[in-house]
Image (cartoon, helix red, strand yellow):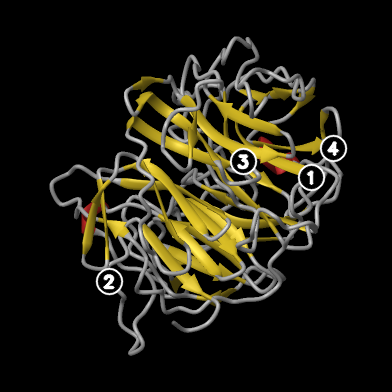
Amino acid sequence: MRRYSLALSLMAASLAATTGLGLPAMAVTGGPVSQIPAAWTPSLATSGTDGSVEQVRQLVPCGTTMYAVGLFSSLKQGTGTYARSNAFSFSATTGAVTGWNPVVKGQVNTVALSADCSTAYLGGAFSSVNGTPATNIAAVSTTTGAVVRGFASSATAKVNTLVMAGSHLLVGGNFTAINGSTKRYMVSLSPTTGKDDGYVNLNISGKYVYTDQGGRPSGPNSTQAFNFAMSPDRRRLLVMGVFTSVGGQSRRQIFMLDLGTTSTAVDPWYSPEFNQNCYISEAFWLRDASWSPDGARVYIATTGYKPATNLDPTVRTGYRTSEPRGGLCDVAAAFPSTSVSTLTHSWVNYTGCDSLYSTAADASTAYFGGHERWASNPLQCDNNTSGTAVVAPGMVGLSPLNGSVTVNPTRGKGRGADDMVVTGAGLWIASDNGWNTSDCGKTSTGGPSHGHAGICFLPYTTP
């Protein structure tokens, strides 16, 4: 998809403190966030009750402006309603919607910004921007919304995720060719020309094929780079997706990429637990990852429902819904970021067979979002009849040390929280309006806070 999971402070483009890749190195060390959301953020203008669900897929800050992309037709903020076609921007401090209005014909999955915030790179499944042909990728002026003509704009299939790495625009998706390059699924492009600059050469291949304990084959899944998560020092990148071989190394669900000065390489970081298979219809299950601010830990958010087979037949864990949970299906989990290929999880927190799609972290808390009903539910699947699980719909905050629930603002589940990003001001959450969902966090009297369809902001101080 699209995550910009790095914990950034809102920053001016003129900041001088940089890493070796020429980009600001900033990490959020505070937290946790308030459970009372800011009332001034924009929201999706439609309710979703007519079945036409709209969705914000990614939020990315640049300077004091927040950029939002997805599948939507209008936003509201304060007393105003604004027609916008799948991309818009707004003030990250007041919520005021800007005049930036690139009319994108088709869904936008991801956005990345140039270092000076003058250009927005869009990726998704679209055919044009402001009437100018652009197939699945485009560079757009953040002043006029016009397509930047010198940047090539043609990918053979959808673009899922973008991130800037110094002078390189890293692109992941389902494509088998992009802007004249025949590199599949992940490539590095020049931010100026959109052409392959040779920085990434990974030869990604493979998909997930297996049979579950009941003899049923795994469902369809296609090779792709689905999501990126940049490390706080911007020297390592986590890539989630569908693959079995990356850079000549055996990898499934996720790999870590070392970002060198002139080239990239697959890091030894890995766990055999990522080789496990989940339910046959959710062969790709590791949807997002985030980093602790010091870069020492990696948090993962997964779907998957339940394991495809019992992981330990002697104790019968996971395959049947009546059994205790097992493996990494439908979990929040933490791993050390050490460059070792035999890692095991530091902790795991089971949702009880509900999906998590997003994660972000500050020093105090690892945040997770999806359409889950519970946290800390390791014994049951799709119920809490024992009453031992924590009711935590839509999102939850966990201890970085042991994965226990420490922050529980709750959120209307909808289809699920698709993106989370921590800035120096707080936690931003991107979601949808499915089933008329608009709740996020609590009011000052403890009830659910309404009016946050698609976008919610939980600040570090009570608004």
Mark sitting on residue 450: 2
Mark in front: 1 vs 2: 1
Question: Mark 3 or 2 closer to N-term?
Answer: 3
429 with respect to 361 (left or right): left
Q: Nearer the viewer, residue 372 or 114?
A: 114
Mark in front: 3 vs 2: 3
Q: Secondary structure at mark 3?
A: loop
170 with respect to 3 (left or right): right
Mark sitting on residue 114: 3
Q: Residue furthest left?
A: 50
Quadrant containing the C terminus in the rendered view: bottom left
Bin the neighbour count of mark 1 within 10 Å (Cα to Cα): few under 14, some 14-19, many 20 and up.
some
Bin the neighbour count of mark 3 within 10 Å (Cα to Cα): few under 14, some 14-19, many 20 and up.
many
Q: Secondary structure at mark 1?
A: loop
Q: Residue furthest bottom?
A: 445
Disc 2 marks a residue whose amino acid type is His
Q: Are marks 4 and 2 in contact (CB under 8 Å)?
A: no
Q: Secondary structure at mark 4?
A: loop
Residue 151 in the image: x percent, y percent?
56, 22
Residue 215 in the image: x percent, y percent?
48, 26
Question: Mark 1 or 2 closer to N-term?
Answer: 1
**Eyeballing the image, is 71 above or below 455?**
above
To which residue does mark 1 refer? 22
Residue 197 in the image: x percent, y percent?
73, 20
Question: Mark 4 or 2 closer to N-term?
Answer: 4
Q: Residue at x 81, y 37 (%)?
A: 258
Q: How far apart are the two marked residues, 4 and 1, measured between alpha carbons?
A: 25 Å
Mark sitting on residue 444: none
Q: Nearer the viewer, residue 437 or 349?
A: 437
Q: Residue at x 50, y 74 (%)?
A: 459
Disc 4 marks a residue whose amino acid type is Pro
